[in-house]
Image: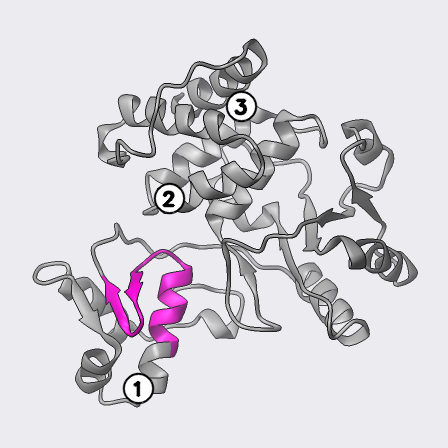
Amino acid sequence: MAILVGEKRFRVPNKVLQLVEARKNGPTLFSVSSLAAELGVSKIAAANYLSRLNRLGAVERVSKGFYSAGARFEPLPLAFDKKEARVRHLIKKAMPFARFVVWSTRRLSAFYHNVPRRYFYFVETEPETAEGIAELLRENNFPSVVLGNRVAGETARELVLEPVFVLKTRSFLGVNGGKGRQEASLERILVELYFLFSRNKLGYSLEELGRIFYNISGRVNLRFSLVVNLARRKKIEKEWRSILWRAGQLDSSLKVPQKYAVNENLSDFQERNVQKFIVDSTE
C-alpha cells in the first residue's frame, strides 16, 4: 500500500508507516540504521523510505542520517498528473543541463475549499534558460509564457485554460530531491503562489489560497523557518510573519514559534493582502 498515489517513487510500505507512528509514543528521534535494523532491510532502502516521508511532511530530517517522528502525520493525497510528468520529461530530454523544477496547483487539490475551475502549471528555472524552455514547450503544443516583473494577470487570461508559466529564479530553496527528480515543497508552493496572486501577476483569489493554507496547516507540520526564508527572498517577509502571527492567534494548535510570527507594521497594500489571506482562511 502506498502513502501517496500517483508516482511510484513516493510509495512507502505499511510496515514503515506503522514503525514511524509507533515512534511518536516514545522517543521521536531515530536513525536510518535503527530503522533498517527493525525492518530487516538495507540502509539504502531505509534511507529512501525516510526521504519520501520527509518530502511529504511525515517525518523531519534533523541531521545526516537522523529523523524525527514528532510531526503531525496524516497520509497526504497529493496529486500528480501526467501533464507535469510530460513537461518534466520533455525539458530533461531536450535540455539535460538546465536546472528546473515543475509543479502545479493540482498538488494542492486535497486542500481546496472550492473546486477550482482550472489549475496553474509552472516551471521554475534560471533566467538564462527561461525563454528557451518556454519556446520548447510551445513547439511541443504546451502553450507557455515567461512571467516577468512586468507581466500582469491579464496576460494569463489571454492564454488557454491551463498554460505552463515559466518563472525565473536564482534560488532553489525548498526544492527537494536529487538531480532530475526534484520536487517543490509545500512551503515553496504556498509562498510563490501568494506572491503571484497578491501582486496580480496571475488572476486568482487570494482568499481561496488562504483557505488552502489553513487546511494544509491543520494537517501538515509546516517548516516555518523555510516559509520565512522563502518569503524573505521574495521581499514579502513582513507579510508572512504577520500571517503566521495571526494564524497562531486564531489556532493555537499550529504552535508557530514566536521568532517567526511577528505582528508587523504593514503598509495599506500589505495589510489588505494579509487580511484577505488570513481572515477567510478560517471560515
Say if 250 sits above or below 235 in the image: above
Residue 278 image offset from top left, x and y in percent: 44, 22
Q: Nearer the viewer, residue 148 or 18?
A: 148
Which amino acid, by three-letter code, is at mark 1? Lys
Say if 146 sits above or below 89 in the image: above
- Classify mark 3: residues with Cα within 10 Å, few (<14), some (14-19) or many (20+): some
Q: Secondary structure at mark 2?
A: helix
Q: Which mark is residue 137?
A: none
Can the viewer see residue 1?
no
Specify start and end residues of the magenta stretch as a single range.
48-68
- Residue drawn at the location 57% of the way across and 65% of the way down: 182
Can the viewer see residue 134?
yes
Mark 2–mark 3 contact, CB under 8 Å? no
Residue 184 occupies quadrant: bottom right
Separation (CA) of disc 3 from disc 1: 45 Å
- Residue drawn at the location 43% of the way across and 38% of the way down: 228
Residue 75 image offset from top left, x and y in percent: 35, 57
Which amino acid, by three-letter code, is at mark 3? Glu
- Quadrant location of the N terminus in the rendered image: bottom left
Residue 77 image offset from top left, x and y in percent: 44, 55
Separation (CA) of disc 2 from disc 3: 23 Å
- Residue drawn at the location 80% of the way across and 33% of the way down: 151
Which residue position is annotated with label 3? 207
Residue 4 occupies quadrant: bottom left
Which residue position is annotated with label 2? 225
User: Residue 66 in magenta?
Assistant: yes
Which amino acid, by three-letter code, is at mark 2? Ser
User: Residue 81 in magenta?
Assistant: no
Which residue position is annotated with label 1? 43
Q: Is residue 108 left or right of residue 72?
A: right
